[in-house]
Amino acid sequence: MKKLIQILTGLAVICFSTSLFAQSKDFVIVESDHQHDLNPHTTTFSTDAQILTGLYEGLFSYNPVTLDPQYAICKDYRISRDKKRISFVLRQDAKFSNGEIIDAEAVRSSWLQLLSTPDAPYATMFDIVRGAQDFRLGKGKEENVGIYVTDKFTLSVYLNTPANYLPKILCHSAFSVVHRIPTVYSGAFQLEDKKPGILFLTKNPYYWDFTNVPSDTITFIQSDNADDNAFYFNTGMADWVSADVDADKILDKKAFQMSGEFATSYYFFKTSAKKNKKAEFNPWDYDEFRNAIIEAMPWDTLREGAMVPAPTLVFPIGDYPALDGFAYTDLIEAKTLMKDARKKYGIPEDKLIPLTFDVAEYSISEAKKEVLVKNCAELGVKLEFNTLPSSVYFNNVTRSNSDLFVYTWIGDFADPLAFLMLFQGDSNLNDSGWKNEEYDSLLLQAAAAEDSQRSAILARAEKILLDSGMIIPIYHPISFNVIDLEEAGGWSTNAFDLHPLKYLYRKVPAKADPNIVKK
């Protein structure tokens, strides 16, 4: 109970009131413990993205139900006949939280700041803009980037190829409008205070849609204690729990919200191109060795308990074609492939090949690890696990010299490209180091293709990725939240498990039940 008392005391100091949880204009969210990066240009975490939906806004925003792009700071746009020029017309009442007008120059400045941020993970998605890639890589000048201010409230963007999907991308927080001062925001809320375990957001008084934002404050409480989190919800202290929770202790079972996510959990190899420590010969740089491991994967064991197994990387969406994925284990074929690979690259059959696998704690059970070690040993491969705390694991992936990693990726926009860009050769999101010219060429072709052809082209690219043995897809995650939709509004299950803060509100004042006792 100590942590709860500390949190409530902190909130009382922030709000100058101990009745925070009884006010209908306040909304309280319990999230997992996480060191937030609230810079839209640098973060890749879904937990950060949830908060950023309130702090920042771009030309478009996600519809909270369908996730389709809808107008935000942009009120209209026009596309040229060759589809390589887009003019965005901005609303004239949009302002930052300090009262400054958000005009076309502010948008341009923010996007150029994204492109000039070293290793900004999503900056490569702007390579479709004329001159953007050269500028991002330090080879071009700012004035040559095809983003121009036509007039005070009109921004023109010149593209290398047509990109009908651009409004979907521009919903992402990386392309929101960011002020030069980090404590100034463009979204419906502003960060009022930040204390250990607490983020306190208040409504932005200059937000263009201020009158339609129902909550005055939104508070994020961080807690990984499943018992505490159930207690917070049962007593009305929290409106929504997205963190771990003891489901058996939740009194209102209709508050459970489960849905499939536009996401995939998978393992991937890292090649020498992304390692600081270079070896004379790294077998995992080559398709032949990786595919031998793929054939030896104990698929049934690895996917045991998964509600939605993932035979491929891309979450099935729209008219995206179904591909033949990985479904069964064939140790005989695996041994044959490994024998051929050893012979081709001069590796003796009796030499043990090391394979280091970085995993986050609790991400793979000990039973599954044992089966993986056993099957790899059949191929003369010594598999060793390097287990890291979940809080540091993902930040360590980029700098680690290990060979294999466990990962979960949630698509940032409703398109197969949201997954395929992870393995694009020059993408800042590509931690694998894998590069394939045909794969990259197909992604470029898809950018210029008509909608009727685009999915087929992207599917061809994914097949190349699967054939390379770079990834080991496991399952599509299921999102689990605790929120009573009879008492909370503006929240809807969706494939991103992303819920824009501007719509959230408490329908009725929360009332704590005096008979609830925490055990």
Image (spheres, rainbow, N blue to C red):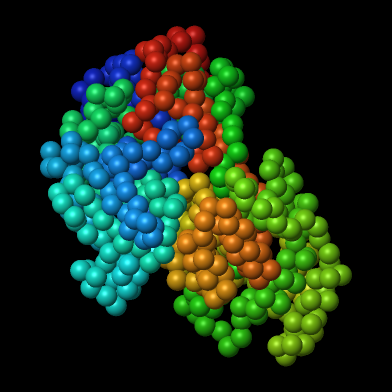
Q: Residue at x 22, y 39 (%)?
A: 91
In the picture, which quadrant includes the C terminus? top right
In the picture, which quadrant includes the N terminus? top left
Q: Is there any visible trace of residue 393 in the rendered image?
A: no
Q: Nearer the viewer, residue 359 or 150?
A: 150
Q: Residue at x 24, y 70 (%)?
A: 144
Name, please, the residue furthest toward the front: 81
Left or right of 339? Residue 159 is left
Name, please, the residue furthest toward the right: 332
For residue 420, above or below residue 438: above
- Across and down, in percent, residue 455 comes to 59, 55
Give residue 471's quadrant in the image: bottom right
Give residue 5's quadrant in the image: top left
- Across and down, in percent, residue 287 comes to 67, 75
Q: Nearer the viewer, residue 12 or 48?
A: 48
All told, the count of numbered labels is: 0
For residue 501, above or below residue 357: above
For residue 442, above or below residue 50: below
Q: Is there any visible trace of residue 168 in the rendered image?
A: yes
- Across and down, in percent, residue 173 comes to 35, 48
Left or right of 169? Residue 257 is right
Q: Residue at x 18, y 39 (%)?
A: 92
Left or right of 238? Residue 153 is left
Q: Residue at x 32, y 49 (%)?
A: 78
